[in-house]
Amino acid sequence: MKEKKSYNVGNVIKRMLKHMWEQDKVQFGRIALYTVVAASYPFMAIFLPKIAIGILEQGGPDAGKNLIAAMIIYACAAGFLAVLVRYLEEYIKTRNTRIRVLYLGDLTRKLMSMDYCHYEDARFFEEYEKGMNAGNNNSNGIEGVYDNLFRLPSKFLVLAGMMVLTGALSPLLLISLVLHVLTIMWTSKRTHDYEYSKKEELSKAGRRIGYYQRTTQDFSYGKDIRIFNLRNRIMENYQEEINAYVSLFKKICNREYLLGLLGIVTLLITNLLTYGILIQNVVAGMPVSSFTMYVAAITSLMTRMLEFGTDLSFIWNEGEYVDDFYRFLDEPLIIEGEKTKEDVLANCRQHSLEIVFDHVTFRYPGTDKNIFTDLSFVIHEGERLAIVGVNGAGKSTLVKLMTGLFYPTEGHIYINGIDIRELKKSEIYELYSAVFQDVNVLAFTIRENVGCASGGVDEKRVQSALDKVGLWPKVSAFEKGLDQMMLKVIDEDGTDFSGGERQKLSIARGLYKDASMVIMDEPTAALDALAEAEIYENFNSLVQGKTAVYISHRLASTRFCDKIALFDGDGLAEYGTHEELMKKEGKYYEMFVIQGKYYQKEAYA
Amino acid sequence: MKKLVHFIKLVWSVSPAYILLLVADAFCKAAKTLINIILPMLLVDELTTDKDIEQLFFYAGLIVLNNVGMTLLTNTLGRFIKVRKENTGNGMMKLMSEKIMNLEYSYLEDPVYLDLKERAVFAVNNQNVITNLILVVSDIVSQGATLLGLAAVLLTLGPVLLIVLAVGIALMLWVYYGISQYQRKITEEIIPINRRFSYYFQLAFDKEVQKDIRLYDMEEMITERILAFSKETCDFFEKIQKESGKALGKIAAISEGIAAFSYGYVGIRTLGTTFGPQLSLGALTMYVSAAINFSQIINTFGQNAVAMMQFISWLDPYMEFMSLAEETKQTGKLPFSGEIETLEFKDVTFTYPKAKEPVLVNVSFQIGKGEKISIVGLNGAGKSTLVKLICRMYQADSGQILINGRNIDEYEYLSYMNAISAVFQDYRLFNFTIAENISCESPKEDENTKERSKRVEQLIDEVGLREKIDELPNGIESRFGKEYDEEGIEMSGGQGQKIAIARALYKKASMVILDEPASALDPIAEAEIYEKFNSLVEDKTAIYISHRMSSSVFCDRILILEDGRVTDFDTHENLMKKTESLYYKLFQSQAENYKLKEA
């Protein structure tokens, strides 16, 4: 993992403002208006006692009338300002939400286009978790910073005004107030730093609690927990993890509390100074109306300074997560060839693919165990290759390498003679129709699930694809036909398919895509024998002369493939046609005989 | 209100200290506000009259003491509250886990309860509803106490100010009511949109779908939905926020009116006795700040009350879940002991709750001690359901399941479950060590530890995991799960399945059920396991379910299920003679693949 660049809050804010400018220029106007109104409104409350008590102190026969007149004017002016401030505030906030939400598309696009390997790297998501949250949260992160930023100018103006007021009374008092606020800000910064230093420990402890929470609340664990009577065991562990988390959390709270004591001391000093100085002034002749005004102003100043400090540190702290967010958007996160190789692609579209593994060594990033060491073999154009082998031999990893989801650690993979590293990732993806064991039917319409796009889907081809896999009778029976929604998450009238039907849908997806090469990765593991046989037939319609790879831990697939590659724990063990391998009487022969033993003649007896 | 009481009781059961601390904190805050309203009166009166320095500093000292002392006190309480909050939040979640484990199993397969649980978890995890509700209630208590104190102060002035205050507050509440009704209405409209948004948004994070997204270029299709739904959500939010902006403005304006009126009215009372006894300037400051405080606090009080109602409604799924009935049907008292001698299904019919069609229809068969049978049928024929009935996860609609001649429901649940062991198709392992996953016993050292590891090691050999285990630095003490621990190990589907098989065999049960136990194993391992099964399960009674027809060759008899009915129950040899039967077809379709070509 790369060393994190140092964080500069200024740059983050600049970029956020730029984004705001690009998306919604009027927002700046709204903020300007808000600043004017919101900066004057708080002074109303400060001057109110001064005005009222001032009139009373002056006395005279008209004091009563004057007071009432003044109060009516006050109520109208302050009321008007109040409505304006609140309305503008809420309106600006809702615009901020819109401005922030526009980032969501960038975020998800980035996720869905970055190199697949990051998904298999738990640390990656840990690193960016806060950053991603910063984009998808309406009180923290980007929106939180926006909401705090727009209030900052007005708050600053109010603060400045009150400081002038207080400073004029006593510079010493002002200094002590500022000191008090700085102390509090400093302690909260220290606490935050401490918390940040414990971040990893905390998130690890949190993850462990999360594991127990998810496991215990995942209904699919229910059966095993009951059969093996694991209830008490698990609950004990759960409690232990909670305790571990809380005791860590306690440390942070203790630090915060102890540092907070410093703030109590400065609070004491400012309080003593405030009352001491004010009482002295009144004794020296200052009117009581001014006394009450100053008390109000100083109290308000103190809370406003603190609030201002909190806002600043909020912006600072959350800005760091926004920085993470921007970092996520900025990092390339995809390693691929630079130029589009149109000629290669055209060639690939016309012919099928030839794939060459040339001295490929591969281990998953962050691990030290080779899945393959110095693996070389060729999948010839138009050939059907069955890849069989024990679990853990890396069969699925082969698919990930061919499709560019991972690059080999050493060695090269060539597609029609060109090194896979020279191609764009999206270009590699385009070349394959792949079907995996776990079919992901998404909550889109059937048409979208097959066509993988919302617009421009060729209806006839979708139909014919569904027809080929034998799903058309079922689909056409739906009232909405192809527009029938899948799953119930989005649409309560959504439908779901059985395991076999899901596989067929997935094959239809592959048929529709009509890519240059076909890959099937364990598509029948969860199906019954008859459904499995149907899938084998579908495989044929999917392939039609294209290069194809069929991965299975069963040997049935070898029946309809031209070549067989047998992988064991050490890589490619045997390669050849069924006849060749049977003649060899090696591992393949052994597997075939063992697995088929009970299907042979003697079993019929 | 009833819900709230129920909730507080629940919190109390998790952490009484938390509630006590919050109450103490609430009263400290209330006291601080009240003292800050009364003391300045004394100070101002002194300032407007004698200006006695000693007296002045005494009052000022009291004010400072209140400010500083109370801050110290609330900080101290706050430190404990913060820790308790984490404890309680997690504790409430754990309570739910406990609930799930105690629920009757049938709930766990019912989508209605699954949905209820998801909503409950969402409310707790994403909306932080538990901690927020607790905090809001404690604020309400604090503000309620303050309001009562202030009302007492204001009453000493006579009714006029109080009446005007009451009118002002009534206006505010009316505005609040309007806005909260509006919010509720719109929020209800947002929920389904937001749920849709979340679904598509989460797709981008879901590892499982990434291969498909990339290979089938679904990025655009998904992003479109995300943007469309987020825009729709924003439109709703804008409506809400504009309205609440107006409402907040009105409320602030009313509040300003109250302040102006207070100064006007109390001010006039300092001038003469027209409206009552003449007041001092000190009293003016006290009454006015009491009135202003009152209207401000009632403001937040109102906000909190609305928030509280909202939180309580969000909490509904959680509370509903927590009040589900626990394992009521497992009423049997008779402890089960000894071995399972016979298992008999007598005319058993079973329909899943809320389903229309029965899954099993008049199923009858009998197996004896030590017999090994296989259940064969297409997907959906009711094979796994049959197993669930034996495991007492569901109860038959009609007919009886008898073990040793007695209805299984008559046996006491735990002792009955001790007699049965199982490997399910969707088996689950836990982030324990390998040894614990197999033995399902606590890792604590005791006299049995040695024997336990010996048996575990032996099973590791038998299921064919020796090689893998020897690779691990910690052997059978290695822990599962990378997300849990960096040192954690991951296993492939096949290896995991072997562990699950070892676990089922470790349990000293007299019947073993193997539901698709070898689906993720490679051919050699699968064949090995099947060949060994008979010796592995020893003299236990065994029920297999497998798609691999070859496995049934090992069994004494094969039970054929078609659409929930038993169509045959016979030996492999006899079944293979019926060339029209489902069994024959299934067997042939697989045997096809293994015909040894004459070399």
Image (cartoon, rainbow, N blue to C red):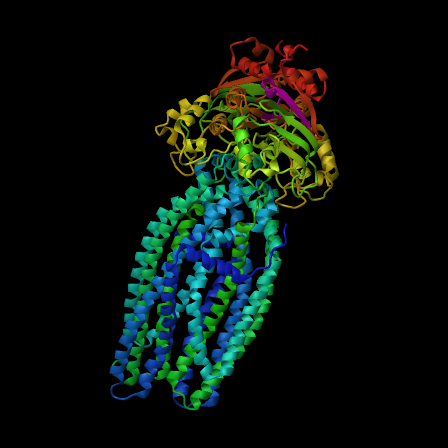
**First to last magenta residue range:** A549-567
Q: Quadrant of residue B436?
A: top right
Q: Is residue B481 above or below residue B284?
A: above
Count the marks: how many? 0
Closest to the observer: A464 or B449? A464
Identify the residue at the far front of this view.
Answer: A343
Q: Is residue B284 above or below residue A374?
A: below
Residue at screen point 57% across, 40% down: A116
Q: Quadrant of residue B374?
A: top right
In the rendered view, does A159 fall on the left or right side of B101?
Answer: left
x%, y% of residue A13? 49, 61
Closest to the observer: A298 or A590? A590
Closest to the observer: A24 or A363? A24
Image quarter of the C terminus of chain A: top right
x%, y% of residue B347? 48, 20
Residue B508, can we see it? no
Residue A473, can we see it? yes
Q: Is residue B135 above or below residue A237?
A: below
Residue at screen point 42% across, 72% down: A157
x%, y% of residue A551? 60, 26
In the rendered view, does B318 fall on the left or right side of B589?
Answer: left
In the rendered view, does A261 fall on the left or right side of B124?
Answer: right
Residue A589 on the magenta span: no
Residue A564 on the magenta span: yes
Closest to the observer: B7 or B69? B69
x%, y% of residue B68? 51, 75
In the rendered view, does B503 fall on the left or right side of A288?
Answer: right
